[in-house]
Image (cartoon, rainbow, N blue to C red):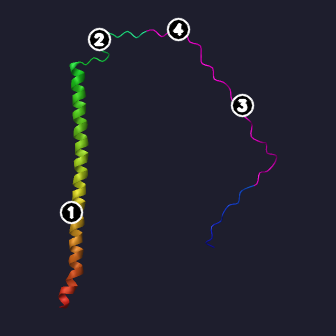
Amino acid sequence: MLRPKIPTMPTPVGVTAPPAVVQPTAVEPAPQTMAPAPVVPTARPTVQFTPGSVLAVVGAGTAVVLVVGTVLVSMLLATAVTAASVAVCAVVVRSLLTSPNKRRR
């Protein structure tokens, strides 16, 4: 009843062909074309910051830091409240378990 059933390897059905033989081929490099044109650096920077965009980035960064900080602090507070409640429960259970022993004497 509890013995595992080990599957048997199925036998191939029909005509089986041997695997095809793959012949290696030589890899020839592509012919070289003209050299690429040199990249000319531009005089102005590619990203330009305006005072409004800097203010928006700073505001968004501040908002992200505040939200992440709030979430982390709330998680820490939840952990502390849970630990305190578990400690109170442990004290109550210990008190309930030891109180009958004191009354018997």
Q: Secondary structure at mark 2?
A: loop
Badge 4 local density, few (<14 within 10 Å), some, or many (20+)? Answer: few
Q: Is residue 52 magenta?
A: no
Please identify the residue farthest to the right as the structure is shown: 15
- The amino acid type of the residue labelled 1 equals Ala
Position of 105 with respect to 1 (left or right) is: left
Mark 4 or 2 closer to N-term? 4
- Judge depth for marks 2 and 3 and give the one in front: 3
* Residue 34 numbered tag: 4
- The amino acid type of the residue labelled 4 equals Met
Which quadrant of the structure image shows residue 89? bottom left
For the record, the magenta segment spans: 11-37
Mark 2 or 1 closer to N-term? 2
Task: Find out whether the residues at labels 2 and 1 contact each other: C-beta distance under 8 Å.
Answer: no
Mark 4 or 3 closer to N-term? 3
Q: Main secondary structure of the magenta part?
A: loop
Position of 34 with respect to 70 (left or right) is: right
Q: Looking at the image, is 100 positioned above or below residue 21?
A: below
* Residue 32 numbered tag: none
| Distance CA(mark 2)–CA(mark 1) | 60 Å
| Distance CA(mark 4)–CA(mark 2) | 29 Å
- Please report the residue visible at 33 percent of the width from the left and 10 percent of the height from the top: 42
The residue singled out by tag 1 in the image is 84
- The amino acid type of the residue labelled 3 equals Gln
* Residue 23 numbered tag: 3
Task: Find out whether the residues at labels 4 and 2 contact each other: C-beta distance under 8 Å.
Answer: no
- Please report the residue visible at 21 percent of the width from the left and 20 percent of the height from the top: 51
* Residue 44 numbered tag: 2
Badge 1 local density, few (<14 within 10 Å), some, or many (20+)? Answer: few
- Judge depth for marks 1 and 4 and give the one in front: 4
| Distance CA(mark 1)–CA(mark 4) | 75 Å
| Distance CA(mark 2)–CA(mark 3) | 56 Å
